[in-house]
Structure formats: structure tokens, C-alpha cells
């Protein structure tokens, strides 16, 4: 998924806000240098105007002024403690910050809230999204190898979004639970009437509550969710604690040829195979399936991913 553009947070000064919007219009018409000049004047007048700093950073980057862009992104980051504008991610992309910094909840919530209304069409029509179908095929194959039916008493859909994975797995589970950080995504999922329970919130906190309440699931799925998570070890460890003894966790990730976690130009994370194997083992899980797959297309090019299934170690 691609970001929907910069979030506008007012400077509190009407004139500066108007200057910012004028600069955005100049940039949209292709006059980047004029837009940069207007934004420079704007941040000189209101030094704490994070939105304007971020826009200036992005324009300087497009103009090829890497040093200027880095300096402006750093100022934008200082003015935006919640990283609504993802300046820290941009700094990492430019090699001027942490290699793969965690994405903040405010940024992710805003990103998906903005995208919710067109999410289903965009993934199906433009990105040829295949995550849920790939997971269903992999889960079916894994169960068939052990002679088990494709049937679950309880299923948890992490980062459920509008319910694309939920719709695929609903026929095979008696109880379907979904959790997502975005209220707008959950609202869209509710309209499909396929979930028995939906929750808005951070899935790490949700899993912690489920652990306390001793809830268990026969299958936990995360379709195209972990591309927004840099460190998978904690969430996999939490998932392991809510799985039934023969339960499965099934998820997709984007991948890259190296080890570790890489921040891609798309500002999503790619997880190397060696890293994934280590994170699965550290969570007390046993790898059942790890397969290469094209999880969608982007700009007409295939996106390399991995389909992973694991079960509790016994």
C-alpha cells in the first residue's frame, strides 16, 4: 500500500497555513523550486510548523538536494514527536537515521484511516493483492499433510483491516475475531458482518489482554500486516501464547535477499529469511511452511514475499 500524502496539521497561524497550501499547489504544478522557496519562508516565520518542514524536506529530496532534505527531515522530526508525517522513516531511507525504525501508532492509524474507503478496490484492482488467498492455500496444504480438516473453532485476524482475510477464512471457522489499529478500517469490516468480534487497537496490547484472559485460537492470520512492523520477535512470542496446542500462525511478509530487516523505498519493511527463521524459533514456534511468493504487484512489478506458517513447539 502506498501512503496517501502528507497529513496537514495547522501551524496555528492562518497566513502560514495559506502559504503552505500555496506551496503544495506549486509543487503539484511541477514548480518545485518555487514551492521550496515559499516553504522556506513559511518555516522561517513559524519554526515549529511540522507539516511545512516535512513538505519542504520532500521537495528538496525530489530536487536532488540530499543534505538539505536530511536537515529539513530532522527538523520536521523534532517538531513532530508522534511522527505523523513519517520523517524518521524518510531519514532512515536516506541513510541518516536508524536503519529500520519502528512506525508510530499515530502514523499508521492516520495512514489507514485515510485509505479505508478505497482500500478494497485499490488492492484488488491495482495491486492484484493475493495475501489472503495465499495464506488459505498454505494453511490447507499444511493441514492436509498432517491429515487434519480445514476447520477451526476460533480464528484471530491480526491487522484485519476491512476484512479481506476474514472473508476468505470465515467459511472455515466457528468464531472469527479481528483487531486493527484503524477505526475507519474496523468500521468498513463491520459492514461485511463476517466477524463475531471486532476490536480497535494496537494488536500487541490486544494480544496481551488475550493472554491475561487465557483466550486461545486455533489459527492466527496476519495478511500483509507485518510489512509495517520492524521487529517481529515480540509479536510472534505473544501470538505463541494465545495459540492452542495444535494451533497455527500464518502470515505474509515482504522479503529481501539479505539478512535482518530492511526499510524499503516504499517505507514498508522487508524481512530476510534468516531473520524470520530466528524470530520464529525465538518465539517458541516450529516452522511448518516458508515459501516464496508474489504477494501483489506494484507499479506493474511483482512484490517478492514469503508465506510463513508455524505451530507451537512441543
Image (spheres, helix red, strand yellow):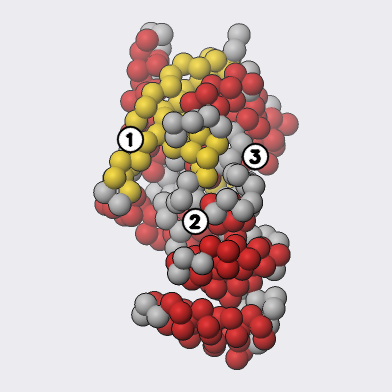
Residue 53 % position (x, y) = 60, 72
User: In the drawing, what numbered circle is on residue 6?
Assistant: none
Q: Eyeballing the image, is 30 above or below 258?
A: below
Task: Say above or below: 16 vs 287.
Answer: below
Label 3 SS: helix
Answer yes or no: do the residues labelled 2 and 3 have beta carbons within 8 Å?
A: no
Q: Nearer the viewer, mark 3 or mark 1?
A: 1
Q: Return the residue at label 3.
A: 204
The residue drawn where x is 68% and y is 41% is: 205
Q: Residue at x 64, y 47 (%)?
A: 98
User: Which element type, helix, strand or loop, lies under badge 1?
Assistant: strand
| Sequence order check, earlier mark of 2 and 1 | 2
Please tell me which of labels 2 and 3 falls first in the chain.
Answer: 2
Left or right, 116 with respect to 285, comes to: left
Near-viewer residue (28 or 59): 59
Is residue 165 rendered to the left or right of residue 280? left
Give coordinates of residue 6: x percent, y percent: 51, 68
Whichever of callouts 3 and 1 sits on the residue coming sooner in the sequence is: 3
Q: Where is residue 7 in the image (x, y as percent from the top left)?
A: 54, 69
Location of the C terminus by quadrant is top right
- Label 2 element class: helix
Residue topped by disc 2: 112
Residue 213, visible in the rendered structure = no
Residue at 65% x, 63% y: name it: 74
Q: How far apart are marks 2 and 3 (CA)?
A: 18 Å
In this orientation, which residue lies closer to the viewer: 49 or 204?
Answer: 49
Residue 156 drawn at (x, y percent): 52, 33
**Separation of marks 2 and 1 at Cα, in angstroms:** 23 Å
Q: Nearer the viewer, residue 76 or 180?
A: 76
Q: Residue 294 carries which label?
A: 1
Residue farthest toward the bottom in the current orientation of the protein? 15
Amino acid at each position: 500500500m502506498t501512503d496517501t500524502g502528507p497529513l496537514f496539521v495547522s501551524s496555528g497561524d492562518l497566513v502560514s497555513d495559506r502559504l503552505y497550501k500555496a506551496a503544495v499547489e506549486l509543487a503539484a504544478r511541477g514548480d518545485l523550486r518555487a514551492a521550496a522557496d515559499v516553504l522556506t519562508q513559511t518555516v522561517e516565520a513559524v519554526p515549529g510548523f511540522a507539516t511545512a518542514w516535512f513538505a519542504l524536506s520532500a521537495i528538496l529530496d525530489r530536487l536532488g538536494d540530499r543534505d538539505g532534505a536530511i536537515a529539513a527531515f530532522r527538523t520536521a522530526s523534532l517538531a513532530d514527536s508522534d511522527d505523523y508525517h513519517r520523517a524518521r522513516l524518510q531519514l532512515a531511507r536516506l541513510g541518516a537515521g536508524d536503519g529500520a525504525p519502528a512506525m508510530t501508532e499515530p502514523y499508521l492509524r492516520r495512514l489507514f484511516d485515510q485509505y479505508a474507503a478505497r482500500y478494497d478496490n485499490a488492492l484488488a484492482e491495482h495491486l492484484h493483492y493475493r495475501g489472503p488467498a495465499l495464506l488459505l492455500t498454505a494453511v490447507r496444504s499444511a493441514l492436509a499433510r498432517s491429515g487434519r480438516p480445514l476447520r477451526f473453532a476460533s480464528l484471530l485476524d491480526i491487522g484485519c483491516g476491512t476484512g479481506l482475510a476474514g472473508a476468505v477464512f470465515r467459511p472455515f471457522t466457528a468464531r472469527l475475531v479481528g483487531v486493527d489499529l484503524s477505526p475507519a478500517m474496523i468500521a468498513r469490516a463491520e459492514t461485511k458482518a463476517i466477524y463475531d468480534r471486532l476490536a480497535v487497537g494496537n494488536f500487541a496490547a490486544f494480544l496481551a489482554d488475550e493472554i491475561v484472559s487465557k483466550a486461545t485460537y486455533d489459527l492466527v492470520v496476519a495478511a500483509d500486516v507485518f510489512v509495517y512492523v520492524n521487529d517481529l520477535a515480540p509479536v510472534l512470542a505473544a501470538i505463541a501464547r494465545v495459540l492452542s496446542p495444535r494451533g497455527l500462525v500464518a502470515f505474509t511478509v515482504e522479503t529481501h535477499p539479505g539478512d535482518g530487516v530492511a526499510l524499503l523505498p516504499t517505507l514498508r519493511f522487508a524481512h530476510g529469511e534468516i531473520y524470520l527463521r530466528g524470530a520464529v524459533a525465538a518465539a517458541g514456534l516450529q516452522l511448518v511452511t516458508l515459501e516464496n511468493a508474489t504477494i501483489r504487484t506494484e507499479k506493474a512489478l511483482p512484490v517478492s514475499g514469503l508465506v510463513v506458517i508455524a505451530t507451537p513447539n512441543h
